[in-house]
Image (cartoon, rainbow, N blue to C red):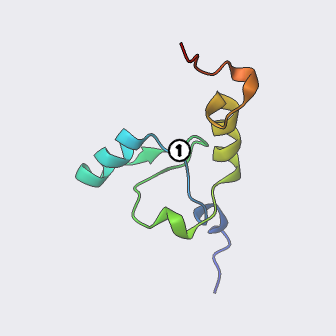
């Protein structure tokens, strides 16, 4: 029997690395870029990346967007 509310759980989400480490140590929930809040407990490599997290991440310039003014090599 399907509960119909599990699709949002089938993604790997982007979260700050230090928040993941803190959650692993003390079990506090983390907040993904898309706003999802949960306590990580599964291997994210087994799931596709959340499309909303990916879009937000790329818009932040982390995806190599040339319009975001990358670092200078001086």
Foreground of the two, 21 or 36 = 21
Number of marks in picture? 1
Q: Measuring 58% from the left and 64% from the top, which residue is drawn there?
A: 9
Instruction: Locate residue 37, reporting x and y percent.
Output: 49, 48
Instruction: Locate residue 14, reporting x and y percent.
Output: 54, 47
Foreground of the two, 70 or 44 = 70
Foreground of the two, 6 or 42 = 42
Where is 59 relative to 48, above or below? above
Residue farthest to the left, as pictured:
25
Foreground of the two, 15 or 72 = 72
Dot 1 corresponds to which residue?
32
Q: Quadrant of residue 10?
A: bottom right
Instruction: Locate residue 53, reporting x and y percent.
Output: 63, 45
Where is 2 relative to 70, above or below? below
Q: Measuring 62% from the left and 69% from the top, which residue is drawn there?
A: 6
In the drawing, does residue 56 fall left or right of residue 32? right
In the drawing, does residue 74 fall left or right of residue 49? left
Q: Measuring 53% from the left and 44% from the top, which residue is drawn there?
A: 32
Q: Secondary structure at mark 1?
A: loop
In the drawing, does residue 23 fall left or right of residue 3? left
Where is 52 relative to 2, above or below? above
């Amino acid at each position: 029997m399907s509960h119909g509310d599990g699709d949002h759980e089938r993604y790997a989400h982007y979260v700050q690395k230090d928040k993941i480490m803190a959650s692993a140590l003390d079990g506090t929930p983390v907040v993904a870029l898309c706003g999802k809040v949960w306590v990580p407990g599964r291997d994210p490599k087994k799931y596709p990346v959340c499309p909303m997290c990916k879009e937000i991440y790329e818009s932040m310039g982390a995806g190599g967007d040339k319009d975001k003014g990358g670092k200078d090599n001086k």
